[in-house]
Image (tube, rainbow, N blue to C red):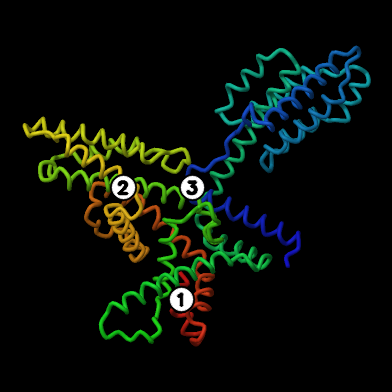
């Protein structure tokens, strides 16, 4: 049983781990200012509440004498935000902000109806101009041009929100090199803390590795039964590295509607994007292979035709991951374009174009790619898996790519790019979680073996 406090502590550790990982590995990661959709329920409620607040403030300031209580609270909040932007040692401006935006002093002035609210607002704007990033200079100019005091205060808070976002992104930018140098140790330490607070934090990972072992045992058993004279009673000796690599390969065909292993949560989005990209590349390779086989030698060695077919297919396969995407419809559109391009190529070289029967045959074969157990789709899928498996078998320091299998040359550039991203994710994941995987593999593969031997064989890196 896990207490609520332990669960919350684990959740905080996971949040910190995920955030640190994203900052370090994603050079484009930054915080963006996001507005809620206007038609959404939450967005509508927020809009109503904000309007009510600012209408109330305007009503209070228009009273005779004006009521400043809400305005004083806003100045107090602005003061804390401005102070949060200061770096250590900025004592002069800190003392000035505290002096000018002294809540007690402003309240005393309000009691005697002597608050210079426009003067305070101008001081705030000038201070913001000193502290903001250059990108906000135009926003500061617009503040100075705003006459209505209520609208001015509203816009001051908007620009302060943007400045907080800028400050967070500046901090992220400065933090990134440190995190990149220390990320392996940091992630491993944080995950260990999660594991101590939530002992079940490796259950899905254990199940993932167990499934990989079962797949390998099944594959080994099939090979043994097909080999004459094989001893079916002998227990296969599985390589931990092979088991782990095959587990990583399963992620390229993972159903991301179910939960991913805990040790891969930080890269779930990246792995899902790679899977979707590979599915797109598989379709393109299938289309090109079918086209070459159907039309024959007349187009096999035509310069740039394969690239033209690829460029035609890519836009029509955009958004394959969306539920609304209709692959059959996309393949029909692709087949029409392919026939047109092939006929144009043949015609330009003075060769007879495809007759109606050949066009229907080509379009029918392209449309059949979506069918289960389609031979061309199965072949290309196996070759993609083989390339990725060969990539994982390379030492992590080796930068060259394995030989591209036949039928994938048209997508070689894209495959190598996706492959390098995939290998980078896997190799880093092994570095961080190697000790945890080693422990699981010892229990599953070497439960009867001496501990020392298991430790030397299990992949700790």
In the rendered image, which quarter is residue 74 located in? top right
Residue 458 bears which disc, if any? Answer: 1
Provide the residue designation for mark 3.
Answer: 26
Q: Nearer the viewer, mark 2 or mark 3?
A: 2
Q: Secondary structure at mark 1?
A: loop
- Image side of residue 436 versus residue 129, left or right: left
Neighbor class of circle 1 (other Cα within 10 Å; few <14, some 14-19, many 20+) is many
Q: Secondary structure at mark 3?
A: loop
Looking at the image, which residue is at 41% across and 66% down? 245
- Of pointers 1 and 2, the one earlier in the residue sequence: 2
Front-most of 213 and 94? 213
- Of pointers 1 and 3, the one earlier in the residue sequence: 3
Provide the residue designation for mark 2.
Answer: 369
- Image side of residue 368 versus residue 122, left or right: left
Distance from Cα at disc 1 to Cα at disc 3: 30 Å
Neighbor class of circle 3 (other Cα within 10 Å; few <14, some 14-19, many 20+) is few
Distance from Cα at disc 1 to Cα at disc 2: 40 Å
Quadrant that contains the N terminus = bottom right
Q: Secondary structure at mark 2?
A: helix
Residue 277 bears which disc, if any? Answer: none
- Of pointers 2 and 3, the one earlier in the residue sequence: 3
Residue 113 appears at what percent x and percent y? 90, 17
In the rendered image, which quarter is residue 294 located in? top left
Looking at the image, which residue is at 40% across and 77% down? 238
Q: Nearer the viewer, mark 1 or mark 3?
A: 1
Front-most of 85 and 212? 212
Residue 107 appears at what percent x and percent y? 89, 26
């Amino acid at each position: 049983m896990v207490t609520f406090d332990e669960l919350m502590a684990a959740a905080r550790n996971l949040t910190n781990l995920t955030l640190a990982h994203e900052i370090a590995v994603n050079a484009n990661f930054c915080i963006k200012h996001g507005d809620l959709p206007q038609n959404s329920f939450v967005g509508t409620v927020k809009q109503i509440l904000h309007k009510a607040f600012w209408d109330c403030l305007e009503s209070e300031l228009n009273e005779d004498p004006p009521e400043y209580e809400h305005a004083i609270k806003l100045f107090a909040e602005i003061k804390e935000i401005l102070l949060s932007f200061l770096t250590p040692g900025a004592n002069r401006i800190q003392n000035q902000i505290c002096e000018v935006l002294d809540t007690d002093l402003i309240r005393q002035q309000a009691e005697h109806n002597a608050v210079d609210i426009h003067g305070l607002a101008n001081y705030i704007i000038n201070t913001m101009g000193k502290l903001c990033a250059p990108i906000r200079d135009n926003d500061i100019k617009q503040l100075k041009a705003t006459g209505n005091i209520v609208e001015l205060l509203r816009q001051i808070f908007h620009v302060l929100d943007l400045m907080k976002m800028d400050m967070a992104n500046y901090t992220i930018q400065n933090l990134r090199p440190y995190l990149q140098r220390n990320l392996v140790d940091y992630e491993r330490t944080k995950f260990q803390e999660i594991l101590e607070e939530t002992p079940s934090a490796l259950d899905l990972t254990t199940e993932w590795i167990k499934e990989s072992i079962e797949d390998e045992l099944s594959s080994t058993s099939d090979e043994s039964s097909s080999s004459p004279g094989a001893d079916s009673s002998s227990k296969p000796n599985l390589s931990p590295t092979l088991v782990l690599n095959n587990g990583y390969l399963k992620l390229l065909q993972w159903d991301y509607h179910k939960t991913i292993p805990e040790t891969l949560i930080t890269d779930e989005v990246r792995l899902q994007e790679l899977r979707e990209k590979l599915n797109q590349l598989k379709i393109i390779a299938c289309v090109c292979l079918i086209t070459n086989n159907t039309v024959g030698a007349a187009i096999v060695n035509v310069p740039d035709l394969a690239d033209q077919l690829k460029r035609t297919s890519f836009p029509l396969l955009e958004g394959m991951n969306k539920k609304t995407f209709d692959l059959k419809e996309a393949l029909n559109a692709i087949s029409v374009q392919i026939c047109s391009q092939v006929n144009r190529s043949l015609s330009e070289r003075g060769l007879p174009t495809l007759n109606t029967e050949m066009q229907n045959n080509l379009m029918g074969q392209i449309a059949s790619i979506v069918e289960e157990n389609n031979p061309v789709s199965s072949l290309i899928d196996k070759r993609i898996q083989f390339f990725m498996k060969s990539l994982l078998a390379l030492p992590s320091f080796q930068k060259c790519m394995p030989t591209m299998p036949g039928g994938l040359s048209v997508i070689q550039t894209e495959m190598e790019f996706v492959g390098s991203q995939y290998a980078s994710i896997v190799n880093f994941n092994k570095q961080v979680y190697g000790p945890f995987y080693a422990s699981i593999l010892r229990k599953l593969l070497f439960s009867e073996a001496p501990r020392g031997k298991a430790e030397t064989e299990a992949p700790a890196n």
